[in-house]
Amino acid sequence: SQQGEEDPQALSIQEGENATMNCSYKTSINNLQWYRQNSGRGLVHLILIRSNEREKHSGRLRVTLDTSKKSSSLLITASRAADTASYFCATGRLETNDYKLSFGAGTTVTVRA
Amino acid sequence: DGGITQSPKYLFRKEGQNVTLSCEQNLNHDAMYWYRQDPGQGLRLIYYSQIVNDFQKGDIAEGYSVSREKKESFPLTVTSAQKNPTAFYLCASSIGAPARHQPQHFGDGTRLSIL
C-alpha cells in the first residue's frame, strides 16, 4: 500500500536553480528514503533518514524530516541537466514483525539548460 | 561490479501464456523484492523473500508466482491469471532480513507488454 505522497507531481526549473519537493505520510515510520529514477531505468538510492534524525546532507542533496507533521522534504541545490529524473520518497516501517517499504507516486523534475 | 541484473529488458506476452522474468544479484544480499510500476504511479510490492526457500506475498501478489532456490536468484512468473500484466517490473535487493535502515538496490527493470 502506498503511504507517501509527493508534492508537486511535476517541477520544471532552470539549470542552477534549487529544486524542492515534499513527501507526506500517514503512519509512524522507522525511516524515510529518497530514490531517483531516470527514464526507463531502475531506482537509485539517494538518502535514508531515520525517524530520530531531523536533517541529512549528501553532496547537493538536503533532506529534512518532521515526524510531528509526518512530512519530509528533498532539496537539490544548484541543479544540473543530469538531475532531470523522477524522485520518490519511500517510508520504511515495521508491520506485524515485518519490515515494509512503501513508495509514493513521485515528483518528475525537469531541469532546463 | 556488483549489482542486480534483470532480463529480458522487453518482454511480450500472448493471451493465456505464462512468462518468467529473471532477476540475479551478486551483492550477497539476503532479501530480494519484486515491484510493479504503472505509469504515473509509485512502486507496488508483488512478492519478497528474506531468505532462500522462503518468500511472502506483497500487496498485489494475485496472478504472480516466485521461487527462491538460490540466494542470487529470484525469478518472477506472470501467469495467465494476471489479466492486466502490462507494466514495468523492478527487482530489488537489500542486506539482511528484515532490512531495517538499509537501502534497496534496484535492477534496470523489465517492460512487459501484451501482444
Image: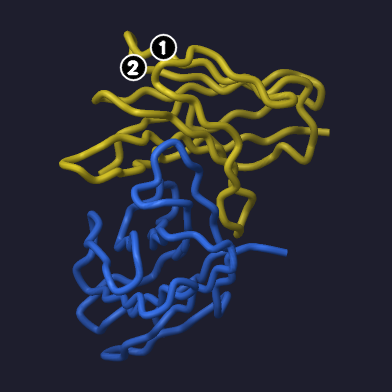
Q: Residues within 10 Å of mark 2 (few under 14, many from 20)?
A: some
Name the residue at the left extreme.
A96
Q: Which chain is yellow?
A: A
Point out residue A110 in the picture as x, y percentages from the top left corner: 67, 36
Q: CA distance from mark 2 to mark 1?
A: 6 Å
| Chain B: colour as depicted | blue
Name the residue that disc number 1 marks: A66
Residue occupying image coordinates x 52% and y 31%: A48
Chain letter for the residue marked with disc 1 in the picture: A
Give me the disc on residue A70.
2
Q: Quadrant of residue B32?
A: bottom left
Q: Amino acid at mark 2?
A: Lys
Q: Residues within 10 Å of mark 1 (few under 14, many from 20)?
A: some
Instruction: Answer left or right for B78 relative to B30.
Output: left
Residue occupying image coordinates x 80% and y 32%: A80
Instruction: Answer left or right for A91 relative to A106.
Output: left
- 2 and 1 marks in contact (CB < 8 Å): yes
Residue occupying image coordinates x 59% and y 68%: B26
* Quadrant of the rendering where the C terminus of chain B is positioned: bottom left
Q: Amino acid at mark 1?
A: Asp
Point out residue B28 in the picture as x, y percentages from the top left corner: 54, 63
Q: Is residue A54 above or below residue B22?
A: above
Q: Secondary structure at mark 1?
A: strand
Q: Secondary structure at mark 2?
A: loop
